[in-house]
Every structure is written in C-alpha cells, then in structure tokens.
Image (spheres, coloured by chain):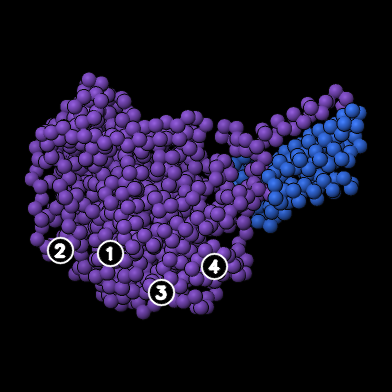
Chain colours: A blue, B purple
C-alpha cells in the first residue's frame, strides 16, 4: 500500500508544475530506487498514478455537475455518459506510469547485476 | 519477465509517451488532453460563487466589474483607457478562442491550424484582399487619437489576459486543435471588422447576371430582373423629401456585353442573412417615449456571436452587445439614446475585366495607357507542410481575384477580374461607435454616422427627447444606374467608381408622420432617391409585414414589440396561395399530394413548429421555381446563371399566365401554368415523402426545419445545439431558418430611466464546459427576453449582482 501512496503523492506534486508525462519520470525514478519485482513495480506505478487521475477527474466531474465530461463524452464516444472518459483517463495514465515503473525496476536490476 | 530488457521497456515507455503526446490526424494528443491537471477537465466550470476577485493586469486605476446572474459584466472604469482595457480583458476571458479563430479565418490563416483542407478558403481571403483591407482600416483607426486609444487599450487588455494563462487554462479548442494563443493587435481588431464586411457586403452575382444577359439579351434580362420589385415598401417612407442638392452622378457608360467571361465562383448573397429593426414614436407608445427594437439575423454559431456588456467611464455609460474582438458597443443604448442596425445590401463590390499587356502581367490597359500592376506576396502557412507563397496582383481597382481558379483560363489571352470592394477603403467605423456610444442627441447620431464606412447598415435611432430616425448608412460609391449589375470593363475609366455619395446625403428620415421607422433589408428608398445604391435588395416580405403591424398598433409596449419580433406570418404564402391553389388540377394528384393540397388550403399561413403547411409551401415553391425557370436557365457549370427572384415569378403567374416560360422546353409537349403548378406540387410531396416518410406529424415545420446553432469548428456536434424546435423561416419576421436567425433580440423603452430587454441564442461564456455556454438558448427559443440590468453607478445595489472583480 505504501508504495502506491508514495507514488500517488509524488506524481501529484510533480504534475502541479510539470507536464503530464512527469508521471513517467516519477514512477521510473521511484522504482529505480525502490521496487521488489517487475510485477509490483508495474502495478504500484499503475495504481498510484491512475488513482490520482481518477480521483482528480472524478472530483472535477462532480463539482461541475459533469457538464464538460458530458460534452467530451459526446465528442469521443457519441454518448453523454461519463463512464468511458472516467475509464480511459486513468487507464492511459496508469499504462504510461506502469510501463515506466517497470522500466525503472528493470534498470535497477540491471545496475545491481552489473 | 527475464526476456524484457531494460532498454526495450524504456524504449516502449518513451514510445508510448511520444504517441500520447502528439496528434494523430484529427485525433488530438490524448495525454495532455485527458490529464486532469492540464486537459479538458480543467475547462469544466461551475456557476461563479459570490466572492470578490482581485486581479492585477495593468490598469491605470482600479476598475470595478460587477457580474450579474447571466454572467454579463458591468464595467466601471475611471478613465477611457481602462474602460477599453477592461473590455478587451473580459472579452478575452470569456471568448479568447473565438475572437482569435475569427481573425485567423479573416486573414486567410486557417491552414496554419487545420492543414491543407483550408488552403482554398485561405487563398480566397488573401486574394479578395482581407488583410490589405484590414491594414487600410488599421491605418485609419490609428490616425485618429480617440480610436487609437481605444484599439490600443483594448489590445493591451486582451494581451493581459493571454499572458496570465498557463496552457492548462487555454480554452478547450486550443487543446483539441493543438496550438496556443498569439498576441492580440490592432490589426486583429481591423480584421474582425473586415470579416463582418465579408459576411454582410461581399455577395455578388455580377457574373451570373452577365451570363443571363449573354444568353437571353438585354430586353428579357431587364424584364425578368427589374430594378424595382412589384411588391415593396421601402425603408425610407415614400413621400419623404430629399432636403439636399444632389451632386452630379457619373454619366451612364456604354455597358456592352463582354465575351467569354472567366469562370468565377463567387458566393452569392445569402438572403437569410438580414435583420429587423424599428422604433415607434411617442404618439404610438404606451409610455409616451420612443421604443426601439432590433434583431440582427446571422448564421447562428457557438460560441455566441455577441457578448453582452455594460461599459461605464466618466465619458459614457452604455449597455448592449459587443462583438468579441471589436472594442465599443455595437448595438445598445445609454440613458439618452438607443440604436440598432440591419444590413443595407448596397452594391459595394464590383468586378472589372482586366486586359494585361502580356503573359507576364506587369502592365494593364486603362484609359488609353498601360499602367503598372502592383504585386503583393501572400505566404500561406500550412500545418505540417511547406509554406505556399501566392502573389496577388493589384490594379487601381483592386486585387485580381480567383487567380488560383485556373478553370477557363487561356494563357494566350491574359486576363482576370479585379475586385473593387468597399472593404479596401480606409474607413474608421470605430470612430462612429465612439460617438454613438456617447450620443445624447439626434445631431450626435448624424455626426457618428458620417464616419461609418462598411458594412453599410440601416441605423435605427431613438432618444429620450422623443425623436426617432432611420438611415441606410455607409460609404456608398457614386454610380450610374445599374453600374455593377453586370461585370464591368476595366479598361474604361467611365466604369470606375467615381467618388462617393456625400455622407450628409445618405437616405435618412426623422420623425415621419406615420409615427414609426423600420427596416428589414428591403429597398432603402423608392426610385425618387437621386442616387443608385443597388438594383435588388432583400425580398420585402418582412418589411411589409412589420410595417402592416406597426401601422395597426397603438399603445405599444416593449412586450408588444417582443411579440412582433416573434411574428410567424408567412406573408409570401398569404400572397401566393390564393392564386396558386385554384390552378391545381386536383384530379391528377397522386398519393399524399391530395392530402398536401387539403393541408395547404386549410393552412393559416403561420410558420409555427407544428405547421405542415409551412413545410409543404417551402418545398413546393422551390420545386415550382425550378419547374418554371430551370429548363431555360440551368446551363450547367459551364455558364453560371441565376433564376429570377420570387417577386418576379409571382408577378409572372399573376399577370402573365400564358407566358412561354411555363413550358418545359426539354419536353415535346407544351406545358401550361396549371401543368407546372400541379407537377411541382406532386414533386414536392414525393420529395417530402422520400425524406420524411408518409404524410403525417413528421412533416411538421419545426421537425423538418430542425434549426441548429453550431460550433465554429465544422462537425463539432458535441459543442453545438441541434434540432431546436422553433418556428419562423426565410422571409418571416422571426427569421429563424435551419442555420440562420436572430442572433440578438433587443427592445429598449426610452424614458427618464431606460428599460431594456434582450436575449441571444447562446450564453456569455465561450467555454462548452461552462454553465453559461448556452444558458440563454431556451429563453430565446421561447421568444422571451431577459431584462437588461443597467446600473447608473458601481455602487448601485441590485439583487441580480452575483460577484465582483477588481482589475488593477
């Protein structure tokens, strides 16, 4: 649980000042320093970042009565339902972060071996 | 996982980040767009809460802005610089993308944003000289100290807003199209004015008319395309005396037909783009003061065309609507006066056939000598492709248009058409609005109008001193009769524009005996006016209907004028059907056509949403017009012509029922008027059956018309309002068609304290994620109006004030 939480906090802080892809930098660096297996690196990174994106998106969605979400859902999925966007948004962030975390772990093992 | 090398996974991650960070065709970069920190989520807004917002933007003294329940800003500045600064700042805050996008379009720069598909449109705008015209206008506005201050303060305000933005705060359209705002400038303000001129005063059918004359000869052309319609009620009431000595108009020049005109694809006038305005005098109103109304009809779009504001400084306090990107109040009122506009439609765009010396096109023939062609390089930037330079040739008439449309061009006869267009004149419309916004008297109104160039407008006026007035006003070329009805000869100086009508002699009427003034784009004057403005104007139905009703009305209130704005009477159908219906050979009608005939007979001529008669009539007239004229007039693409107006068609049916035009020359039989009436009604019914299914409620006018207000990006349905159930139509006072209609409705009661009402089909915010994006749409659809909050001072208490902003 703790790694997920740490990744979430660190990636959130990074995104306040850096572009969206800072999620990859954070998870790579985090797993380079601290990760036990590839599987864990991937899923901890995935969940940590995806939770932040989902949470923030959901917060905005609820606070604004879903007005913009409905229009964008119409644009992307031809439906007013926000479900699609609320899945895709954390998914792409999670995938990016997960892969990057895995890359961080693999680099760590390679360095340890070398 | 052992087979996964770090290098491979790093590469995969980088590839994913890059793939999500760039656009793919029309799909925007998904990473930044979906990020809740920077993407579309950041564009989601809630109703503003009641709090005081302090911003530092660069004002000279603190500016107080009060926002009402419709998010309309009421600006109180301590000097004029700050007033226009705040206007720029607040307009950009709500409408930045829209105002910038429109200047890109006007400047022929859309391909920069959307790529190759906009290149032809960009070329068109470059070649017609939009930027050249804007540069002339910019010079004019910067050479006057008042307008220089206005345009520079406004631009500074826009730029203060732009520089306060982080990419996460950019309007959603920037994120979708993948670009960022650039600095605003006075040239952009000028470009917006030119865009309006392009919308309202750039239609032309000179070529079509020349072709008609070539095919049918002068006599038939004059008969079918007369210089004054059968049914008309001009804007300046007949009998008004012209209290001036006219200047000498140029002698009619020999306007011989010219051989082989080049193919010239020019947009015709859109008859649905028109407007209504009127003012009733004190003797007709319930208040004893004038009441003024205006509803400009345009192609309805989102973000909304207009932006409501109240602008107050020590020199003025005015309220109404502004155009995003253009400083000042365009339609509105202050405590002393109210004004509004409709389009005039004078002929201010002509084409001259140019004779070049040789294929190098360095010199052209004019007035017995070779004159030098000036070259202007236009570089069209295209997203993802190399720049496309385009050399536009300028004669003293204007730019050579349609150089890129090489169709029909023969290299051994170098030629082309130069466009003489009012938009190239250095006029200063902003000065006119500067005076009008501060006007107190009728004389101020007259003084303001003299500065106004284009697009020419019918300026309606009323004041608290109980005057009402109307003036079709703009810079009008001094022409011989019918000059520019056909293509002109660019070698002959007698065909040139030879000066302008003196502004003081523009048509104008003050306090006419009938007790009201009105305009609806019909003829400006009857033929007694000593100058030529155009041979055709918008059809007169709206104007005649408005005048009928205003004549009958007494004890007029703001609400009775609101009802007139929503009038649904189809006057054209009321004129035509009593003649049309008895001509039908009912026994020949098949299937649903008999039901259609019965429906038309029972129809009350109201274009309301449930009327099937309106659907039938509209489709029938289209088929009938084609049935009568197309067999002779449709020459295919090779020779573009146009059909006579409905007014002439109706006259033909009423007064020349045996005319040869009713025969279809493409069949061996000899068709008569009843034949074409019957077959066109049958065809109309068949077409509607095919489109809407069997005769029934699906044929109702509201469903068939399905009005939409669309976002400025084509195909952006998600940000548009579709299938709006509203009555009206072309030629109806409530002129709401499929795509066009009243873009703003306003009624102002003058008096000790003015009371005003208004609405437009959209909302103050240009952000689709804002609750104010289209919150006024339903009020507009129902034909209702919101009361306009007009505050005497910043300290005035009102329950409608929601929040406050101080701009430092």
- For mark 1, give the secondary structure: helix
Residue B458 percent across, percent down from the top left: 27, 58
Measured Cα–Cα span from mark 4 to mark 3: 18 Å
Foreground disc of the pair 2, 4: 4
First in sequence: mark 3 or mark 2? Answer: 2
Q: Nearer the viewer, residue A3 or B648?
A: A3
Residue appearing at x 88%, y 25% in the figure:
B2
The residues bearing labels 4 and 1 have C-alpha atoms spaced at a distance of 32 Å
Picture quadrant where residue B4 is located: top right
Q: Residue at x 58, y 53 (%)?
A: B165
Query: How far is disc 1 from disc 3 in space, using C-alphas?
Result: 20 Å
Residue that badge 1 annotates: B448
Q: Is residue B669 above or below residue B266?
A: above
Mark sitting on residue B314: 3
Give the camera-side residue of B48 and B219: B48
Whether marks 2 and 4 lie on the same chain? yes
Establish whether labels 4 and 1 are both on one chain: yes
Q: Whole-Å distance between the Cαs marked 2 and 1?
A: 22 Å
């Amino acid at each position: 649980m703790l790694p997920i939480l740490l990744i979430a906090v660190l990636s959130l802080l990074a995104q306040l000042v850096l572009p969206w892809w800072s999620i990859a930098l954070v998870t790579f660096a985090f797993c380079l320093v601290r990760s036990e297996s590839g599987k864990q690196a991937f899923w901890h990174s995935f969940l940590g970042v995806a939770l932040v994106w989902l949470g923030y998106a959901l917060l905005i969605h609820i606070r604004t009565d879903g007005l913009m979400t409905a229009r964008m859902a119409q644009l992307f999925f031809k439906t007013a339902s926000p479900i699609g966007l609320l899945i895709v948004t954390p998914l792409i962030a999670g995938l990016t972060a997960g892969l990057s975390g895995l890359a961080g772990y693999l680099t760590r093992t390679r360095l340890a071996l070398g | 996982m052992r087979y996964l090398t770090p290098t491979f996974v790093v590469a995969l991650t980088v590839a994913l980040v890059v793939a999500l960070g760039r656009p793919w065709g029309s799909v925007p970069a998904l990473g930044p767009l979906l990020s809740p920190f920077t993407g579309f989520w950041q564009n989601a807004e809630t109703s503003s809460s009641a709090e005081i917002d302090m911003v530092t933007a660069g004002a000279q003294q603190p500016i107080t802005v009060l926002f009402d329940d419709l998010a309309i800003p009421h600006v109180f500045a301590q000097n004029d610089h700050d007033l226009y600064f705040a206007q720029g700042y607040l307009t950009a805050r709500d409408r930045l993308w829209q105002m910038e996008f429109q200047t890109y379009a006007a400047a022929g720069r859309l391909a920069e944003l959307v790529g190759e598909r906009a290149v032809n449109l960009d070329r068109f705008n470059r070649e017609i000289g939009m930027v050249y015209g804007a540069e002339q206008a910019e010079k004019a506005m910067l050479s006057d100290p008042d307008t220089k201050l206005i345009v520079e303060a406004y631009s500074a305000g826009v730029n203060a807003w732009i520089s306060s933005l982080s990419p996460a705060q950019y309007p959603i359209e920037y994120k979708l199209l993948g670009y960022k705002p650039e600095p605003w400038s006075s040239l952009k303000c000028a470009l917006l004015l030119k865009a309006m001129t392009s919308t309202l005063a750039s239609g032309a059918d000179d070529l079509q008319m020349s072709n008609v004359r070539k095919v049918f000869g002068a006599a038939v052309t004059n008969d079918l395309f007369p210089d004054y319609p059968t049914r008309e009620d001009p804007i300046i009431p007949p009998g008004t005396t012209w209290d001036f000595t006219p200047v000498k108009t140029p002698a009619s020049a020999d306007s011989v037909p010219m051989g082989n005109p080049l193919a010239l694809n020019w947009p015709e006038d859109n008859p649905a783009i028109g407007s209504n305005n009127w003012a009733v005098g004190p003797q007709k109103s319930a208040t004893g003061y004038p009441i003024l109304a205006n509803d400009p009809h345009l192609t309805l779009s989102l973000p909304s065309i207009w932006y409501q504001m109240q602008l107050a400084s020590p020199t003025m306090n005015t309220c109404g609507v502004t155009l995003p990107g253009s400083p000042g109040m365009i339609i509105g009122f202050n405590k002393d006066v109210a004004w509004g506009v409709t389009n005039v439609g004078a002929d201010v765009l002509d084409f001259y056939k140019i004779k070049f010396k040789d294929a190098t096109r360095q010199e052209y023939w004019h007035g017995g000598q070779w004159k030098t062609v000036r070259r202007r390089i236009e570089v069209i930037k295209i997203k993802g492709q190399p720049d496309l330079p385009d050399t536009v040739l300028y004669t003293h008439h204007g730019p050579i248009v349609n150089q890129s449309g090489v169709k029909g061009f023969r290299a051994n006869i170098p030629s082309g058409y130069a466009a003489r267009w009012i938009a190239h004149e250095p006029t200063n419309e902003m000065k006119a609005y500067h005076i009008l916004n501060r006007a107190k008297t009728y004389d101020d109104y007259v003084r303001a109008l003299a500065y106004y160039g284009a697009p020419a407008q019918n300026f309606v006026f009323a004041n608290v001193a109980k005057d009402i007035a109307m003036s079709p006003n703009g810079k009008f070329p001094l022409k011989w009769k019918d000059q520019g009805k056909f293509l002109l000869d660019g070698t002959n100086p007698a065909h040139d524009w030879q000066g302008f009508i003196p502004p003081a002699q523009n048509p104008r009427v003050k306090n006419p005996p009938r007790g009201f003034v009105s305009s609806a784009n019909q003829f400006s004057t009857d033929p007694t006016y000593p100058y030529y403005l155009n041979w055709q104007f918008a059809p007169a139905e709206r104007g005649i209907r408005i005048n009928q009703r205003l004549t009958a009305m007494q004890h007029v209130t703001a609400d009775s004028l609101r009802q007139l704005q929503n009038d649904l009477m189809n006057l054209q159908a009321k004129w035509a059907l009593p003649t049309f219906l008895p001509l039908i050979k009912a026994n020949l009608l098949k299937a649903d056509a008999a039901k259609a005939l019965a429906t038309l007979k029972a129809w009350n001529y109201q274009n309301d949403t449930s009327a099937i008669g309106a659907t039938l009539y509209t489709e029938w007239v289209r088929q009938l017009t084609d049935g009568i004229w197309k067999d002779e007039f449709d020459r295919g693409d090779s020779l573009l012509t146009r059909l006579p107006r409905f007014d002439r068609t109706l006259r033909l049916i009423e007064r020349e029922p045996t005319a040869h035009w009713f025969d279809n020359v493409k069949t061996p039989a000899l068709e008569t008027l009843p034949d074409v009436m019957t077959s066109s009604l049958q065809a109309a019914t068949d077409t509607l059956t095919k489109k809407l299914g069997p005769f029934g409620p699906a044929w109702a006018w509201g469903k068939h018309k399905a009005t939409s207000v669309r976002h400025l990006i084509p195909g952006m349905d998600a940000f548009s309002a579709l299938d709006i159930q509203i009555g009206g139509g072309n030629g109806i006072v409530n002129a709401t068609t499929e795509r066009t209609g009243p873009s703003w409705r306003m009624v102002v009661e003058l008096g000790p304290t003015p009371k005003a009402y208004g609405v437009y089909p959209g909302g103050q915010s240009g952000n689709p994620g804002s609750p104010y994006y289209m919150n006024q749409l339903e009020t507009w659809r129902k034909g209702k109006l919101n009361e306009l909050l007009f505050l005497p001072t910043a300290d005035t208490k009102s329950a409608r004030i929601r929040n406050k902003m101080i701009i430092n």
